[in-house]
Image (spheres, grey):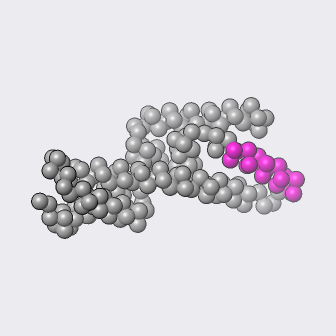
């Protein structure tokens, strides 16, 4: 039988340090660690089948953080669109009314193009351009290797360019 208090006290600092490799959101890391231990406790009857409990904790934490990113990506699609519109519109304050209207139309089309991307493509665009993450961070967050991140980014940009060209946006 596992002593959960002892396991928690022994692993909490290491798990937290491990979580910082995926995100700088300290509260999210703490919540995810808590979720992992709650899940572990609720499934305590099945723990005999787990060979290495520490490994299980690390893998569970990584998966929980990835789940949280996926959930947040879906929840914040509207925020991304609003933030994109705000940042683009803020930079165009000095433009005349006609230019502002033209810029807003272009931004609306861009948001539409981004919405038509696959969820993974939207996620990588969001992580790279809006959250300004490095490719190495994106690898960890999305759970794919470096070359796959580069390929996905390239395909996403090509798709956006194609949509823009087909709609006369460029």
The residue shown at (20%, 57%) is: 44
Q: Nearer the viewer, residue 89 or 64?
A: 64
The residue shown at (63%, 33%) is: 159
Residue range highlighted in magenta: 96-112
Residue at the outermost front position: 45
Residue at the outermost left position: 1
The residue shown at (77%, 38%) is: 169
In the rendered view of the protein, which quadrant contains the C terminus? top right
- Tell me, yes or no, if residue 10 can be seen here: no
Relative to residue 114, is residue 101 drawn left or right? right
Relative to residue 20, is residue 89 drawn left or right? right
Say which quarter of the image contains residue 115. Answer: top right
Relative to residue 34, is residue 164 drawn left or right? right
Q: Does the magenta stretch include residue 106?
A: yes
Most frequent secondary structure within the magenta stretch: helix
Please say if 75 is above or below 112: below
């Amino acid at each position: 039988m596992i002593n959960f208090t002892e396991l928690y006290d022994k692993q909490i600092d290491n798990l937290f340090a491990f979580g910082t490799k995926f995100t700088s959101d300290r509260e999210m890391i703490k919540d995810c660690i808590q979720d992992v231990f709650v899940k572990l406790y609720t499934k305590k009857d099945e723990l005999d089948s787990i060979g290495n409990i520490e490994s299980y904790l690390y893998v569970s934490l990584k998966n929980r953080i990835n789940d949280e990113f996926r959930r947040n990506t879906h929840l914040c699609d509207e925020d991304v669109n609003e933030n994109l519109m705000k940042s683009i519109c803020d930079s165009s304050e000095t433009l005349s009314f006609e230019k502002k209207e033209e810029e807003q139309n272009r931004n609306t089309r861009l948001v539409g193009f981004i919405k038509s991307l696959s969820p993974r493509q939207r996620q990588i665009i969001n992580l790279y351009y809006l959250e300004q993450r490095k490719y190495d961070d994106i690898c960890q967050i999305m759970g794919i290797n470096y070359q796959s991140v580069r390929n996905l980014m390239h395909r996403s940009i090509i798709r956006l360019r194609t949509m823009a060209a087909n709609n006369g946006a460029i």
